Image (cartoon, coloured by chain):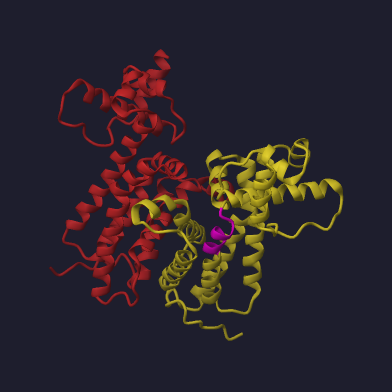
Chain colours: A red, B yellow
Amino acid sequence: MSTAADHDRAAAPAAPPLPPPRGPAPAEATRERLLQATHELLTERGGGNVSVSEICERANANVAMVKYCFGNKDGLMLALITRITDSFRTEFEHLAEQKLDWREKLARHLRAVVRNYMRYPYINRLLMDQLRQADEHANRMVSDSFVVPMAEFHRTLLTEAEQSGAVHRHIDPVLFFFSVVGMCEFVFTAQPWLTYGFGAALDDDLVERYADHVSELVLASIGTPSGDGNRSTE
Amino acid sequence: MSTAADHDRAAAPAAPPLPPPRGPAPAEATRERLLQATHELLTERGGGNVSVSEICERANANVAMVKYCFGNKDGLMLALITRITDSFRTEFEHLAEQKLDWREKLARHLRAVVRNYMRYPYINRLLMDQLRQADEHANRMVSDSFVVPMAEFHRTLLTEAEQSGAVHRHIDPVLFFFSVVGMCEFVFTAQPWLTYGFGAALDDDLVERYADHVSELVLASIGTPSGDGNRSTE
């Protein structure tokens, strides 16, 4: 415990996934500490297992508070997941509001999706766990948090692309959602194949190249080379 | 056991993943029955858990034979996975040899990758389990079986595309591999989002539409609308 634990703790990311809420109520503060501790432990372990007792030790919280704040460990994990996926939604909603050409929005969005898997190196595994468990409540929460809104964002961009005459075929936004998210996440999911098949590391350089690759592949498909930075004239 | 089990058994797919080997040695025959039984049980359960005792009961084999033939259950699963991924490799190697334009080869290949996830409804989950466990031996086996050969196949097609002048940018075949496989598999991995987010079923119709979508998206990106069926002049 003591020094080694303190050292690990110092190395953990300082910032919580999102700013803490306004309320200073003690249970709210504990809830935040539990989420932050889980975020730190999962980040340190790249998504490996963390136990409730480890989380509570890191958060200086009584184990009973997990039950009080979240129902159980699954509830804690779901709260962390949706906090992160809410931040993804906020990100593309903000992008949607900007006065940019659909190409530029789509290119920025795709790069952001790739980078977010690097930024939260455990989110993919948590989402995969949840998909695998096929828990209806949890998957509905995640669908509401970012899946359906992201497909709507894609629908808007694809409609703009069609109206601009850039794309000469109709692209189904739901199929598009699954295909582009699959492109973005798979290099993270299949990291062992990158390591053992190709001897490559999933480092910042590869992630940036992958973000460019995905963005170029999709933009080129929709009718224009990406990176030409065409801006809307509005 | 008896009637209900017999009924389930009758409903299981009859064909093994690949033809049985030539040798009639008793251990070889048991090995085949164990692989076939695992294939049937996983197909019936869409990739859910199956126990060694269930597999052995279905295969009419002694539990000790799992150890004798495969070392342990992980070894049995790895043998089943690589048998299937070997069949994927055989499929695209056969396609590579045909006198077809790179466009047609790529379109057929992408549709086949999508359909293979439907054909072996448990393969995605087994591969995900293996990726998650990050077992070096198993991931090297799978990489050798189809990951590296498929990226090589992609490299050949992309080189042909570049040489034909269809594509005006260099596409890294390793990044391309991860992006297209991710596109193909994600709708299967994220099936609960399809269900709870969009109220859609992952049925044959959706899979065919998805196969067309992926094929069109990638082909359009490389420089030509897919489906025009241009043939090589060789």
| Side (left or right) of B14 relative to A99 | right
Q: Where does residue B129 sit, x and y in percent of width and height?
A: 55, 43
Q: Residue at x 58, y 52 (%)?
A: B123
Q: Quadrant of residue A148?
A: bottom left
Residue A79 forms part of the magenta stretch: no
Depicted B233 relative to depicted B212: above or below: below
| Side (left or right) of B99 relative to B211 | right
Q: Quadrant of residue A35?
A: top left
Depicted A95 relative to depicted A204: above or below: below
Query: In the image, which residues are magenta?
Result: B113-121
Considering every residue shown, the one lying at the far right of the view is: B25
Tell me the chief SS of the magenta region: helix
Q: Please say whether residue B180 is visible from this viewpoint.
A: yes
Q: Please say whether residue B159 is visible from this viewpoint.
A: no
Q: Residue at x 64, y 76 (%)?
A: B98
Considering every residue shown, the one lying at the far bottom of the view is: B233
The front one of B6 and B90 is B6
Depicted A79 relative to depicted A29: above or below: below
Q: Where does residue B156 sit, x and y in percent of width and height?
A: 57, 68
Residue B117 forms part of the magenta stretch: yes
| Side (left or right) of B209 relative to B28 | left
Q: Residue at x 36, y 51 (%)?
A: B196
Q: Quadrant of the C terminus of chain A?
A: bottom left
| Side (left or right) of B56 relative to B183 | right
Q: Where does residue A138 sit, x and y in percent of width and height?
A: 36, 41
The front one of A35 and B14 is B14
Depicted B176 relative to depicted A79: above or below: below
Q: Where does residue A3 sit, x and y in percent of width and height?
A: 40, 15
Considering every residue shown, the one lying at the far left of the view is: A234
Q: Quadrant of the N terminus of chain A?
A: top left
Considering every residue shown, the one lying at the far top of the view is: A2
Q: Residue at x 29, y 48 (%)?
A: A144
